[in-house]
Image (cartoon, rainbow, N blue to C red):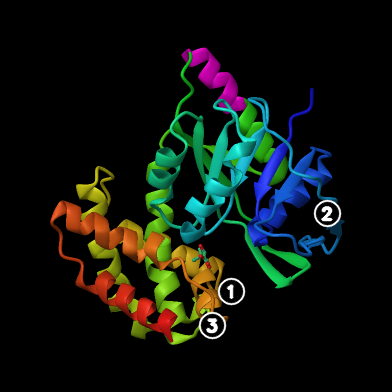
Amino acid sequence: MTSHIAIVGDGAIGSLLAAGAQRNQSPYSVLLRRQRPAVTNVVHMDGTSTTLHNREPVALSSRDLLIVPVKYYQLASAIEQWRHLLCPDTPVVLLQNGMGGHEVLTSLLPDNPLYLATTSHGALKVSAQEVKHTGMGETKLGVIAPVHGTSNEQALLNNRVTAQINACLPPVLWQQNIQAALWEKLAINLVINPLTAIDDVTNGALKHPHYQRQIHNICSETAMVMTACGFPTDTQSLVARVRKVIAQTANNYSSMHQDIHHGRQSEIEGISGFLVRQAKKTGIDVPINTGLYQKIRALSLK
Ligand code: PAF
């Protein structure tokens, strides 16, 4: 029996997932918060496009999958809205920028097998009906709440979920420690997102010597908090990783830049806000990240 993939929302990444499912002829539905025209066209990097044929939401069994690629601040209401579709065995994948979402998910869905994912694919919603795939990337996936069964059952489920995500947003790299992978991504977002949004620049502008001290200081605070939280690292390796992503995405505007400049709510609570909260818990001072957090919050209120 073919399994069904339900995707919450028709955001840029949600629509890429739907296009992947469509291309692989996997049955899928895009769950919208309210009735309205959804994204119908996804333009791929080779210039071809996929027309989405969305289906009505269906009740999801243990063979199906719910993917939640929504912003941190939309997560709780999205789960409240759609959990009636789930059975206690339906696996759920949270795909998000930033961190902190998994606590929300585990408290709202204490019984379901839960997975976390992060992707470096770039996508842009160019209109209410069209999404463009703007950068090739990869998707990291790992489990956070295991099934209440044997390790063999867990391994089978992990393989199935990997294959389902791989059909939608390949390539999938399975992570034994997905939290570590998310911290590494967070370290990159902590630099690029607030700086580009505050200064209204592309990611590539952060190559300028003017930013290097600030980048070093953000990474130094992040390294201390990561280490205190059980993910040991050092400033130099974080700076090197940040520089690599700045070079790879030089022409892009970061997601936070786009949110702030289009007057949308940003993901600051799951990025700098998350770091500031972890710093408080571990008794570490993070004045640079706290300053950036406050600046973005002030910009969001304008
Ligand atoms: O949020 C984003 O925009 C992306 O995660 C990244 C890696 C910063 C590139 O723009």
Q: Which residue is mark 1?
A: 252
Labels 2 and 3: the sequence-earlier one: 2
Q: CA distance from mark 1 to mark 3?
A: 14 Å
| Secondary element at image label 1 | loop
Q: Majority secondary structure of the magenta segment?
A: helix
* Vertical order, 96 against 28 (above or below): below
Q: Is residue 264 left or right of residue 136?
A: left
Label 2 Cα crowd, 10 Å radius (few <14 / some 14-19 / many 20+): many
- Is residue 161 in sight in this rendering? yes
Residue at the image point whose x is 43% and y is 71% from the top = 192
* Vertical order, 94 against 37 (above or below): above
Q: Which residue is mark 3?
A: 261
Residue at the image point whose x is 40% and y is 67% from the top = 268
Label 3 Cα crowd, 10 Å radius (few <14 / some 14-19 / many 20+): some
| Secondary element at image label 2 | loop
Which segment is the magenta one?
A: 150-159
- Is residue 208 in sight in this rendering? no
Q: CA distance from mark 2 to mark 3?
A: 28 Å
Q: Is mark 1 within 8 Å of ligand 1?
A: yes
Nearer to the camera, 77 or 205: 77
Q: Is mark 2 within 8 Å of ligand 1?
A: no
Q: Which residue is mark 2?
A: 52
